[in-house]
Image (cartoon, coloured by chain):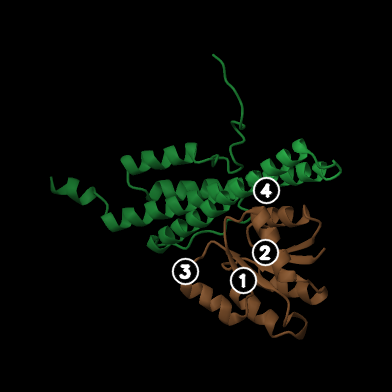
């Protein structure tokens, strides 16, 4: 009985590792969503440029209004990024280790990081949750954004 | 049409501000933070500067303070475009020399009308 109790890791330790894992996953998810948002902005810019040579009229006005609506709506992505950055920073304060620099974070480094986190995570629900986050959080375990299963792919049985 | 410098660390926000202003014929340059903005502003004179507040390296309030200390930008409209809306932060912006404080998300038409207003 006593041995079973001793095997349970300290709650503080578990919390620190969980917070670290959460902060890292948030950073990756935020980084991954940046490129599609920029792509969307570029597409809007091309649409706006395409409208410029057109003479004024109902259709042009309507399309310009739609682009303006997209500009307003896309700013909520930026707001979400700011909110997530605050949450990530709060998690970071709970961690025992400084977070790795995410810029230029390659597949090998990502796998090393995951392995280290898995080792330090307490068994059971934390571990399962971590694996679930890795699979669904938009972060492929290969570190390249999920190259094993490209976005939009379809598997039929 | 005016030469405008848009400063924001978010790539999508820089794009959206540029899109909103250039659609009305303004010439827009962008910078990613206060430090880069100062370098760009020293190389080229702008008629209006629109800046975010929270940015790495140098924030928007420090940028406004720096620009106001330069003769070329003493009377240039400097607008803050930010999610921050507390009275305290606005006061800091005003004390640094900002011309106005816009809270995100912005409406493109409203942004254009504010730019026209500060230019006139």
Q: Which residue is mark 1?
A: B100
- Colour-to-chain, green: A
Marks 2 and 4, how far apart in space?
25 Å
Marks 1 and 4, how far apart in space?
27 Å
Residue drawn at point x = 82 percent, y = 74 percent? B43
* Mark 1 vs 2: CB contact within 8 A: yes
Residue B104 position within the rendered picture, expressed as x and y whole percent measured from the top left: 57, 58
Marks 4 and 3, how far apart in space?
29 Å
Seen from the viewer's position, the closer of residues B38 and A139 is: B38
* Mark 2 vs 4: CB contact within 8 A: no
Return the chain for callout 4: A
Whether labels 3 and 1 belong to a single chain: the reply is yes
Whether labels 1 and 2 belong to a single chain: the reply is yes
The numbered mark at residue B114 is 2
Whether labels 4 and 3 belong to a single chain: the reply is no
Q: Is residue B94 visible?
A: yes
Element class at badge 4: helix
- Circle 1 or circle 2, nearest the eye: 2
């Amino acid at each position: 009985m006593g041995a079973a109790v001793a095997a349970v890791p300290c709650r503080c330790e578990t919390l620190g590792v969980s917070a670290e894992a959460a902060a890292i996953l948030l950073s990756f998810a935020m980084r991954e969503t940046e490129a599609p948002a920029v792509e969307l902005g570029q597409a809007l810019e091309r649409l706006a440029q395409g409208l410029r040579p057109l003479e004024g009229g109902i259709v042009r006005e309507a399309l310009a209004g739609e682009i303006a609506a997209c500009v307003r709506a896309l700013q909520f992505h930026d707001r979400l990024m700011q909110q997530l950055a605050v949450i990530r920073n709060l998690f970071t304060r709970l961690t025992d280790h400084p977070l790795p620099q995410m810029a230029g974070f390659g597949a090998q480094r990502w796998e090393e990081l995951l392995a280290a986190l898995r080792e330090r995570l307490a068994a059971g629900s934390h571990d399962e949750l971590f694996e679930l986050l890795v699979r669904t959080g938009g972060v492929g375990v290969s570190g390249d954004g999920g190259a094993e299963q490209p976005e939009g792919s379809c598997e039929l049985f | 049409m005016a030469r405008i410098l848009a400063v924001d660390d978010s790539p999508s926000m820089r794009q959206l501000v540029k899109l909103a202003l250039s659609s009305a014929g303004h010439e827009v340059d962008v910078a990613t933070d206060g430090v880069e903005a100062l370098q760009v502003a020293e190389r080229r004179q702008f008629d209006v500067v629109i800046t975010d507040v929270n940015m790495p390296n140098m924030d928007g309030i420090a940028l406004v303070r720096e620009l106001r200390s330069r003769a070329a930008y003493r009377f240039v409209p400097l607008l803050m475009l930010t999610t921050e809306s507390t009275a305290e932060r606005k006061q800091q912006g005003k004390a640094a020399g900002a011309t106005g404080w816009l809270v995100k998300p912005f409406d493109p038409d409203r942004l254009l009308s504010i730019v026209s207003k500060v230019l006139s």
